[in-house]
């Protein structure tokens, strides 16, 4: 793993966490009360899954073998 890959994977994971939080907050708001534990839990899990999926490869980072 290179620094470029780590940076790209972290940016992708942070975006995923933010998107999940926004979606969870929006859904919870419709149900009358925001459960912050659910928002945090769903967001953290989404971030972890994003990092795990990134291990397979990131389209924005060229494979070292291709260079």
Image (cartoon, rainbow, N blue to C red):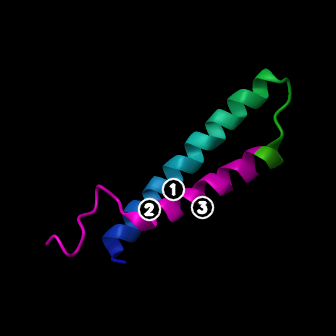
Q: Earlier in the sequence, mark 2 or mark 1?
A: 1
Quote the CA–CA distance across marks 3 and 1: 7 Å
63 is within the stretch colored magenta:
yes
Q: Earlier in the sequence, mark 2 or mark 3?
A: 3
- Which residue is disc 2 drawn over? 54
Instruction: Name which quarter of the figure residue 18 lies in.
Output: top right
Query: Residue at coordinates 65% horizontally, 42% vertically from top-left?
Result: 21
Determine which of the numbered discs, if any, sits on residue 63 in the image.
Answer: none
The stretch of residues the image draws in magenta is 39-67
- Which residue is disc 3 drawn over? 48
Query: Residue at coordinates 66% horizontally, 50% vertically from top-left?
Result: 43
Task: Say whether marks 3 and 1 touch (CB < 8 Å).
Answer: yes
Task: Say whether marks 2 and 1 touch (CB < 8 Å).
Answer: yes
Label 2, secondary structure: give it.
Answer: helix
Other residues around mark 3 within 10 Å, as few (<14) / some (14–19) / many (≥20): some
Label 1, secondary structure: give it.
Answer: helix
**Vertical side of 35 occupied by 28: above or below:** above
Task: Say whether marks 2 and 3 touch (CB < 8 Å).
Answer: no
């Amino acid at each position: 793993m290179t620094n470029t890959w780590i940076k790209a994977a972290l940016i992708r994971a942070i975006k995923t966490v933010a998107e999940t939080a926004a979606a969870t907050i929006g859904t919870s708001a419709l149900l009358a009360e925001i459960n912050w534990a659910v928002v945090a839990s769903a967001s953290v899990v989404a971030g972890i899954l994003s990092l795990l999926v990134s291990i397979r490869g990131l389209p924005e980072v060229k494979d070292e073998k291709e260079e």
